[in-house]
Amino acid sequence: MWEYSDKVREHFFNPRNSGPLEEANGIGDVGSIQCGDALRLMLKVEPETEIIQDAHFQTFGCGSAIASSSALTEMIKGMTLDEALKVSNQDIADFLDGLPPEKMHCSVMGREALQAAIANYRGEEWSDDHEEGALVCKCFAIDAVMIEDVVTANNLNTVEEVTFYTKAGGGCAACHEGIEEILAKVKASRPGAGETSPPPACPATPEAPKPPSKKLSIVEKIAKIQEVLESVRPMLQRDHGDVELADVQGKKIYVHLKGACSGCMMEAATLGGIQQKMIETLGELVQVLPSSHMPVEA
Amino acid sequence: MEPIYLDNNATTRVDPAVVEAMLPFFTEHFGNASSIHAFGSEVGKALKKARGQVQALLGAEHDSEIIFTSCGTESDSTAILSALKAQPERNTVITTNVEHPAILTLCEWLEKEGYIVHKLKVDKKGRIDMDEYRSLLHDRVAIVSVMWANNETGTIFPVAEMAEIASAKGIMFHTDAVQAVGKIPIDLKNTKIDMLSLSGHKLHAPKGIGVLYLRRGCRFRPLLRGGHQERGRRAGTEASASIVALGKACEMAMHNMEAENTTVRRLRDKLETGILSQITHCFPTGDVSNRLPNTSNIAFEYIEGEAILLLLNKMGIAASSGSACTSGSLEPSHVMRAMGIPYTAAHGTIRFSLSVYNTEEEIDRVIAAVPPIVAQLRKLSPYWTDKGPAANPEAAFAPTYA
């Protein structure tokens, strides 16, 4: 059984705003009975102000699909259409205190129904740009379509590269075989496939970057380190984590991993990614370590 | 409110008598059966008794034909990989497209490794076409593996007849019988079945114990190599407590076989009739006249299975579903798709699987609980109106994309 939050369960057992809405002037239908999820979102929009006065839903789907639909209608009531369009699927999931990774598509469906309903109200055509594939990486909820797109766009060749770009495969390793299959499939479809060319080697250690023209002062160096940390923080914060600088000792940069990052099974990968950026920015080989590795007596 | 457990095809409770039988093997009888001293020989004797109890339930000719493993999946993998390894000149496996993932996932991997796998199709009741089966048997086939009974629908396959046909062509026959053992009588000595898998936790023994039956004379290669346990056919120290438990559970299954096919069958039929007579647009799946006595799989149209399960769970009722959402995949159960059950129904399939522990009173409670749940979810469904299903459900709901 899934680990549903209390809020998901509550919205599933007592769905708000279900059933047809007679005075609806914007209706969005998404999903299909084939894939086991279908959602009709009905909006009653005040034409003068474009405020959503009422919202109802009808859903064919699992517990989280029904809960996401219910949550969405509660969230958008009273919003203007432009405000409602800013509601992301992550917002819906957050409203419900999170969804299991396999169920994130339920919140995606809610966002799409909203876009479809608003397009319908405005008399526009809404076309879906979202194609959903089978879930490959369960640790980070990455599906096959996303991996294939990223592999194609960036000409990736190894599981390690896929992990670096998408996080897929960075957790329990169960999906490495699946990622390898996608890599093989994309490789076979590349122009010139079939010709023999040696597989590009993945360097075991990052290549030593060119030395900078002049040596950085310690102040300049710390400023640059802070710059790098600032650049990765939004990404970590999105996953409810954070990072801050603890100390710099020679070539060792110690950081505090905070929130969801501390104790995360991706800690090593996160630090590895930060280290890579540090090396590129500072122009020298450095090591990024968790603050727990700091020597007791510095 | 006492919970009602109707998910016995997933797993079963360990019978208290079974627990009692196994407990001493954690404490005073902790020895290693291979040891020469008294601690070991006590255990050795207990394993021999358990082997005999399993032999009796399966109707095997010799107790040495019973190999203890860790689970049904291990038995399945051992059987198929052994057949391929022992007969390198044969590269083909024949199975069905409604097998358990223990077989299907292994076969998918074998295909990647270069082996040829033929999956027999089933008709809309889940039955195999025997003519298609006969036409596929040739001298490159290493093994046929067909489940005795399907876990989702309970549909029984004619494995004894299929084994006769394979045997006449000199082809090995394996059956995954984890759902059948203990529910229907089995008498292996009077069949041509070469290998059979069973799983302890499906018949009131603990999880983590299984059996591979291997007919005497059948060519074999072990999966796990190491010590001499199980005559070198499955290395690894015997899980003595679990083996003793399985022996006891098999003895009890023999004793309960009649109740399984009378009392349990009657309760299953009562449950199914009770539900079908109260709810429109639902139907039983599988071969209703030829299935396990404990299983009923009902498809409720226009609603989704996980939602049904969550509401049943709230009422203290445990069942399972073939919907996509319960497995985390995008497709409903491969068994439902193989039978051509339409998507409007396949996502709403619910499996009720009973055991001898279920009572009349429990079944009455379930019969009363299901109709309001179905009505509640249909009220939420865009494919359903006050009067019943939308006249043309596919047209009534016209998504921007599908």
Image: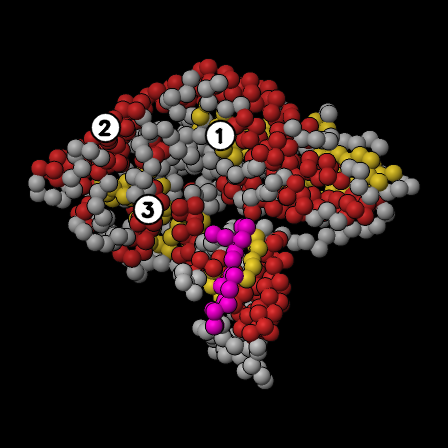
> Residue beneath label 2, please?
B21
Residue B340 seen from this side: no
> Residue beneath label 3, please?
B74
* Mark 3 to mark 2 CA distance (whole Å): 25 Å
Residue A260 seen from this side: yes
Image-based side of B204 in relation to B270, left or right: left
Image-based side of A164 in relation to B47, left or right: right
Disc 1 chain ID? B
> Residue beneath label 1, please?
B319
Outermost residue on the front side: it is: A297
Q: Are marks 2 and 1 on the same chain?
A: yes
* Mark 1 to mark 3 CA distance (whole Å): 26 Å
Q: Are marks 1 and 3 on the same chain?
A: yes
The main secondary structure of the magenta stretch is strand
Which dot, 3 or 2, sits closer to the camera? 2
Earlier in the chain: of badge 2 and badge 1, it is 2
Which residue sits at x=51%, y=64%?
A247
Which residue sits at x=82%, y=43%?
A80
Image-based side of B378 in relation to B89, left or right: right
Q: Over which residues does the magenta segment extend? A: A246-263
Taking A194 as reference, is B195 above or below it? above
Taking B108 as reference, is A289 above or below it? below
* Mark 2 to mark 1 CA distance (whole Å): 29 Å
Amino acid tagged 2: Ala
> Is disc 1 placed on a helix, strand or loop?
loop
Where is residue A4 drawn, in percent x and y? 55, 37
> Is disc 3 placed on a helix, strand or loop?
helix
